Image: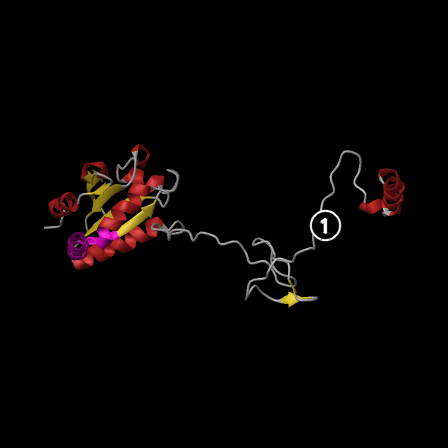
Amino acid sequence: MTKSLLPLAVVALFALPASALPGPGATSVPQQKPTVAPVPAGSGVRHGMGAPAPAMPPSQPGPGVAAAPAPTKSSTPPVYDEDADAKTDVVVAVAKAKKEKKRVLVTLGANWCGWCRALDGTFTKDEKVAAAIAKSYVPLKVDVGRMNRNLDLTASWGADVKKGVPLLVVLDGKGKVVKVQDTAALEAGKGHDPEKVLAFLAANVGR
C-alpha cells in the first residue's frame, strides 16, 4: 500500500506552480489582502478614487498660493528725536520758559540707553512727577547718539555725557545753567525713585 502512494505524491509535488513552493529552508507565508487605512471625516479635499489628497508640509504653501512673509518684530518707538536741531530746540525752550516764568529741564540721553528710557517713563507715567514738571519746567530731550552728537552743546553746559547718561541740565529763562545732575543719585533698584526725582525738581524750581 505504501509503495503505491509514493509515486502519486511525487507527481502532485511537481504539478504545483513554482510560485507556490517555498524556497530552501523557508516556510511559506500566507498571502494577505492589501488594506486601506480609513480616512477621517473632514480631512480635506479628496481626489482620484476617493483617496485623500496628500497633506502639504506646514512650511509650504498650497499650489498657486504665495508664501506669507515671516512676521517681524515692531521696533520700540524712539524717545529721543535723532534728527532734531538741538540748538534751535534749546532756544525755543528757553524763550518759552522765560515767558511762562519756568525753567528748562533738559534730559541728555539716547534711544539705545535703557536707563534713559526708564527715566523718561518716570517723567511721563508717574502722575506726581509729570505734574511737577508741567507746573514748573519746560521739558526738552537732547539726543547724544553714541556719545557723538551735540557734544559742543553739552560741553557748554559743563555736562560730560561720556561719563554716562541720562544727565539732567536745568536752565533758567536766560539759558544759564542752574544745575547738572547725575541721575545715578535718583535711581532705585531697576528704575528711578519718584520721591528722589520730586525732591530734585523742587530743589531747582524757579523762584
Q: Position of residue 34 (x, y in %)?
A: 69, 55
User: Main SS of the magenta segment?
Assistant: helix
Q: Secondary structure at mark 1?
A: loop
Q: Amino acid at mark 1?
A: Gln
Q: Which residues are magenta?
A: 123-139
The answer to which of 157 and 34 lies nearer the viewer is 34
The residue located at (83%, 46%) in the rendering is 19
Residue closest to the far front: 1
The quarter of the displayed image where residue 155 is located: top left
Q: Position of residue 126 (x, y in %)?
A: 19, 53
Residue 137 located within the stretch drawn in magenta? yes
Please give left or right for residue 81 compared with residue 71 in the image: left
The answer to which of 92 and 11 lies nearer the viewer is 11
Q: Position of residue 67 (x, y in %)?
A: 59, 58
Quarter of the figure with the N terminus: top right
The answer to which of 74 and 28 lies nearer the viewer is 28
Residue 200 located within the stretch drawn in magenta? no
The residue located at (15%, 54%) in the rendering is 128
Please give left or right for residue 16 compared with residue 157 in the image: right
Residue position marked by numbered label 1 in the rendering: 31
The answer to which of 183 and 100 lies nearer the viewer is 183
Looking at the image, what colour scheme do you see?
A: secondary structure
Can you say whether 130 is above or below 44 in the image?
A: above
Can you say whether 126 is above or below 44 in the image?
A: above
The residue located at (35%, 44%) in the rendering is 110
Report the label total: 1
Q: Position of residue 61 (x, y in %)?
A: 60, 58
Please tell me how crowded label 1 is: few (under 14), some (14-19), or many (20+) other residues with Cα within 10 Å.
few
The quarter of the displayed image where residue 40 is located: bottom right
